[in-house]
Amino acid sequence: MSRGATTSVDRRAADHLANRAEMLERLAEVQAVQAEVLEGGGERYVARHRQRGRMLVRERIDLLIDPDSAFLELSPLAGWGTDDPLGGGLVTGVGLVEGVTCVISANDPTVRGGTSSPTTVAKGLRAQEIAATNRLPLINLTESGGADLPRQAEIFVPGGATFKGLTRLSAAGIPTVTLVFGSSTAGGAYVPGLSDYTVLVADQAQVFLGGPPLVKMAIDEDADEEELGGAAMHARISGLADFLATDERDALRLGRLIVRRLGRRRPPGPPTPPEDPILDPEELLGIVGPDVRVPFDVREILTRVVDRSEFDEFKPLYGAQLVCGWATLCGYPVGILANNGILFSAESQKGAQFIQLCNRSDTPLLFVQNITGFMVGTRYEQGGIIKHGSQLINAVSNSTVPHLTLMVGASYGAGNYAMSGRAYDPRFVFSWPSHRIAVMGPKQLAGVMSIVARAAAQRAGREVDEEAESVRSQAIEAQIEAESTALYATGHLWDDGIIDPRHTRTVLGIALAAVHAAPVAGSRSFGVFRL
Ligand code: COA
């Protein structure tokens, strides 16, 4: 049953080369957007920030994490395709501090003074969720003007969850540390206020519920900024600061010291030594084509990601369009469910069984999505496709081992749900640039709308204006196409980031190390399976 390093991929074949060229083109598009994010708020604001002698947000993170360790940045392109600043003016991710895997959430003060747009709020809450579900310490690097005031209606109510989340982490025994580098006003003041540990940078950090203008408006007091909320005042008088750092480097040193003193047990690491795949991950670029209807063997992806390219397949002859099996990835055992075509009844039942087995053995699950949906049609409805699909969704929903989801191709319809899409709480979700996501394919959706419109016209005894219908149909198809891209999805935080296919193993390896910070315990109870 073990599938070793066998492959049908021919890296010189015309289709492989065409797929590779297309993937590299999409990757270049993603990288161009990434380059924009790295510019922060733009040249003018970056220059002003530097003139003030301050470090840029990614420089702060670099100095916080362990030397030569990787920082897995999450949702860097959040906000793409929205009115919000790209990246949300917040950098979040997972990194090692003193050997402890931590979640880091850091304002970029060059982006509108580090203020919060709806994307900032959603991205920050997602970082807290990752800290909570994986029991990872959360480190905030704070320098933020609080709410983006003209847009307050969009963020005021949902933004309240940020502070609730912080204190709930603390209540759950998950450490929270906040290093304040600059202004932290109004709502922002509760970030240090609700953290377990705080460090404020002298002559830089200013934390107040209301800044001098507001104090003037509210109580007609002419307040001095340093006396009102300066770092030295908070260290000596209010007690909000646990540590007064002499400068930014000192604050980052103190942040590391705090993590060292948390006394957190370092995770034991993977149970077996990681071993690279035998098959070349470079070939991952040429497997998935631009047309989601062209099938490919998903095993060609799995064997370029898992240790030694070894994949032990479960029930290979049954429900063959859902590939299930076991592997180790960077030394961690995983159960894998990967689409090799549409989901029929047999595939659904096989998947439900496999998920139960992995829960029994406390094995984390990796879902690899390339799914256009469940099979439709009279034969399949009569065969019980709804019941069987429900069994799979039941198993996915009630499974308690960590799920990682990788979207490599299509993610349409309930197939997204059954394969642990975002709404099913996978611990991490990553996409390839080839990813497409929607309730159904754009052509199908436009076709359905056209049939519905024609039926309505017929009922009303109206002639169908073929020209107008064709224009309308094309417009719908173009709209759905534009809303289905990997960039659109990542812009709306439907994933934790688009990754280069060649980095899949590294990214999933970091994610697996992160999920093992919390106990991995499978469920013994699922919903009632309708048989
Ligand atoms: N909402 C919307 N935009 C804001 C903002 C806010 N809360 N705070 C700052 N901005 C904008 C500024 O208008 C400016 O935009 P512009 O460059 O297009 O003119 C940009 O962000 C940078 O602000 P600036 O004041 O030039 O930067 P700074 O680094 O000198 O100061 C702050 C940053 C955050 C300290 C300062 O802007 C400030 O005190 N803002 C108000 C904070 C506040 O009272 N928040 C209440 C939240 S409930």
Image (cartoon, rainbow, N blue to C red):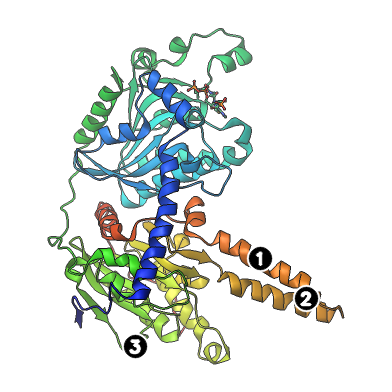
Cβ of mark 2 under 8 Å from ligand 1: the answer is no
User: Where residue 242 appears, x then y in whole percent?
Assistant: 31, 23
The residue lying furthest to the left in this view is 273
Q: Horizontal placement of 21 versus 41: left or right?
A: left
Q: In the rendered view of the protein, which quadrant contains the N terminus?
A: bottom left
The residue under the point 29% across, 85% down is 316
x, y percentage for residue 489? 49, 56
Q: Earlier in the sequence, mark 3 or mark 2?
A: 3
Name the residue that disc number 2 marks. Answer: 466
The amino acid on which the numbered mark 1 sits, given as a three-letter code, is Ile
Residues packed near mark 3 inside 10 Å, few (<14), some (14 to 19) or many (20 plus): few
Q: Write down the quadrant of residue 432 in the picture.
A: bottom left
Residue at image coords 42%, 33%: 108
2 vs 1, front mark? 2
Coordinates of residue 275 in the picture (x, y in percent): 14, 63
Q: CA distance from mark 3 to mark 1?
A: 38 Å
Q: Secondary structure at mark 3?
A: loop
What residue is pinned by disc 3? 318
Q: Is residue 444 left or right of residue 256?
A: right
Residue, x 38% and y 48% (percent of image)?
A: 74
Measured in 3D between alpha carbons, the distance from the residue under mark 2 to the one under mark 1, in whole angstroms, is 15 Å
Label 2: state its secondary structure: helix
The amino acid type, in three-letter code, at marker 3 is: Tyr
Q: Earlier in the sequence, mark 3 or mark 1?
A: 3
Residue at the outermost right position: 461
Tag 1 residue: 476
| 2 or 1: tag closer to the N-terminus | 2
